[in-house]
Image (cartoon, rainbow, N blue to C red):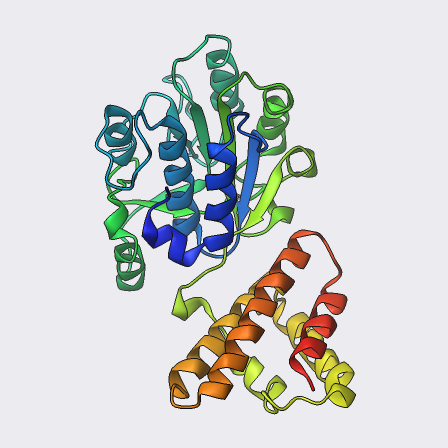
Amino acid sequence: MFHPILKRKFEYVTNYFETAIKNEKRSFAQSIVLYGQDIAAQYYLAMEIARQLNCMKDADPACDCLNCSWIRNNQHPAVLTVSKNDNKPSDDTSSKVISIKQTLMINNSLINSSDYYRVFIFCDSEIGEMNEFEKKHIQDFGGLNFKFPQENWIPKPLNRDVLIEASANSLLKSIEEPPERTLFLFLTEDKEDIIETIISRSQSFYVPSFNAQSYDTEFLTAVLADYPAIKKINVINTAAVLLEAMQEHDYKVEYVLDCMEFYLAQMIKRNLNNKMLVQKIKKDISKIQHAKKQAQAYIKPQLIIEDLLFSFAF
């Protein structure tokens, strides 16, 4: 079972993998893209998936088997973080990209069989001092007891300048025809930041951010001024205002849905004595979560926003 810290924050993703991992056929894609604004959360989620796949016992959050211990200490021989700073061949002098030498090393390693479930976690990274906010955010996941690959290591999202096209293309055959018990995980803010040939061969999961500083709720204040009393007759105009604000700020629909969920969650805290309002807000938050699934299915943002606001209205 996934650690409660992750289950509380990422119920949809953790439930999906728990169900798939329990299935003897392990019926999920062998290449996964996690995307969203919280890269630290994605990294911890990727490490927990690796632990679940390699645990020698029942994958309990407190399991202390050898594989779980190795993974928590970032020392497992088959669970590798691949970034511009990690897992480079000795003759690789590149410092700004995930190089072809790195991806060829991975391809060559797959020729040999393994007793472990091999997991390759691709991300960008920086070596340096975290700011106070980053340190506090990492503490939110402290109960997982996962260590980063090296000291002063900061996870960053993949983009095309780091996972360059030549390196990405050299992975395609391994992604298309991987050996059994092999998983590729790519961590990024936006699927467009990874070349289409990898995205098309992968299953994508949006990982929401629960980092309060990352939410812009100011632009929602005017848009949702009539909430919870939005009228159906006003929905199209309200949706148009919201879509215009999204375009002005260059916000993706997934991020806007995160902001709306956070905005409504804060409204619950301010209205705990109003049971009817709290009940409605909780129902509307579940509708936002449904809208996130629509976004994952590539439904147009305009349709998602209009459908969501109509579901709020009376």
Report the number of discs: 0
Report the front residue among 178 and 90.
178
The location of residue 159, given as percent across then percent down, is 55, 44
Residue 193 vertical placement versus 179 (above, below): below
**Horizontal arrangement in the rendering, residue 83 relative to residue 165 (left or right):** left
Residue appearing at x 69%, y 36% in the figure = 200
Q: Residue at x 45, y 41 (%)?
A: 124
Quadrant the N terminus occupies: top left
Outermost residue, top side: 112
Res 260 seen here:
no
The answer to which image quadrant residue 271 occupies is: bottom left
Quarter of the picture containing the C terminus is bottom right
Describe residue 97's horizontal placement relative to residue 76 as left or right: right
Residue farthest to the left, as pictured: 64
Image height of 122 relative to 44, above or below = above
Give the percent coordinates (x, y) of residue 17. 49, 40
**In the displayed structure image, the side of residue 56 where residue 42 appears, left or right:** right
Residue 122 seen in render: yes
Q: Position of residue 236 (x, y in %)?
A: 77, 82
Q: Quadrant of residue 227?
A: bottom right
Residue displayed at 41% across by 44% down? 45
State the image coordinates of residue 78 (x, y, percent, origin top left): 38, 22
